[in-house]
Amino acid sequence: MPLSTQSQTEGDNYVLVASLDNVRNLSNILKAITFKDHAIFNATPNGLKVTVEDSKCLQANAFIQAEIFQEFTIKEDSVGFQVNLTVLLDCLTIFGGSTVPGVATALRMCYNGYGYPLTLFLEEGGVVTVCKINTQEPEEPIDFEFCSTDVTNKVILQSESLKEAFSELDMTSEVLQITMSPSQPYFRLSTFGNSGNAHYDYPKDSDIMELFQCTKTQTNRYKMSLLKPSTKALALSCKVSVRTDSRGFLSLQYLVRNDDGQICFVEYYCCPDEEVEEE
């Protein structure tokens, strides 16, 4: 790949180098968490974690494992920086994000360390474009303290069924109410919009339900405006895990297959809007 020699002269200085034969394997997953301008990048030998947050109520994380990249070299235990995600996506799709079979944009992403820009070498059909994006010192992401040992209820669904529900629910509702229970209705989504109240129920033994682990009845409401960005991840995913902890915090984990069939994960954390009396 011509890109491997393109940045060789400076290569020794880079603390992070990540290369992809198909840039869509990065750009698609980043689109799934794009709802604010800035994103925190944290690279470790395991891969790349990209975090976007909204007013301490919502956090989205995209995980791109090191194995996804054709090359992933990191010279420190951890490399972190903050960039404008909108600008980064504009650069990654500078060739138009072609979906034509056999035509792919290759990427070599390099970072020199604190104070340096993020440098992108993009190549398609022999044409190379170099983009440099200013980086900032990363802010510390919010710790939602969502601990797997504190999970009270968990279901894993095929994404199609959740897409169907979101297409039928009344999006004029300010909140989405989620009920999870070891007894009926098991797993229920409710809205309270202009056209009245609506419920969408999932039987625990249906084909679309891959896992059902509910230990107590919980009903929580979440602001629809906070959940709407997660539908981007839902659209790309094939499975989704819905978990709540004892505080009512919500975790949505999306399993996403890229163009090459490799698996990445997108996770959304959302805090509950208000307490709801259990009936």
Image (tube, rainbow, N blue to C red):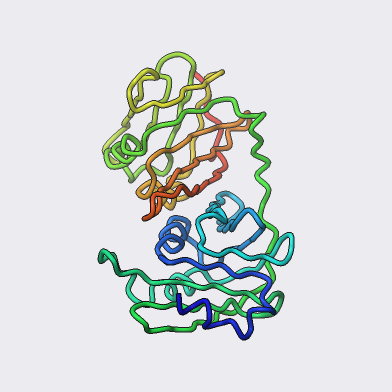
Q: Nearer the viewer, residue 213 or 76?
A: 76
Instruction: Spot the residue most to the right.
Output: 77
Q: Quadrant of the N terminus?
A: bottom left
Residue 177 percent coordinates (x, y): 44, 33
Residue at image location 41% in from the left, 38% down from the top: 239
Residue at image location 35% in from the left, 24% down from the top: 202
Residue 228 percent coordinates (x, y): 41, 50
Q: Is residue 123 above or below residue 161?
A: below
Query: Quadrant of residue 100 in the image?
Result: bottom left
Q: Nearer the viewer, residue 79 or 260?
A: 260
Q: Is residue 238 above or below residue 112?
A: above
Instruction: Spot the residue most to the top.
Output: 183
Would residue 113 be found to the left or right of residue 212 on screen?
A: right
Q: Nearer the viewer, residue 230 or 240?
A: 240
Residue at image location 43% in from the left, 20% down from the top: 186
Q: Is residue 84 above or below residue 204?
A: below
Residue 121 percent coordinates (x, y): 49, 79
Residue 2 percent coordinates (x, y): 46, 79
Tell me how many marks there are.
Answer: 0
Would residue 266 be found to the left or right of residue 118 on screen?
A: left
Query: Quadrant of residue 247 in the image?
Result: top right
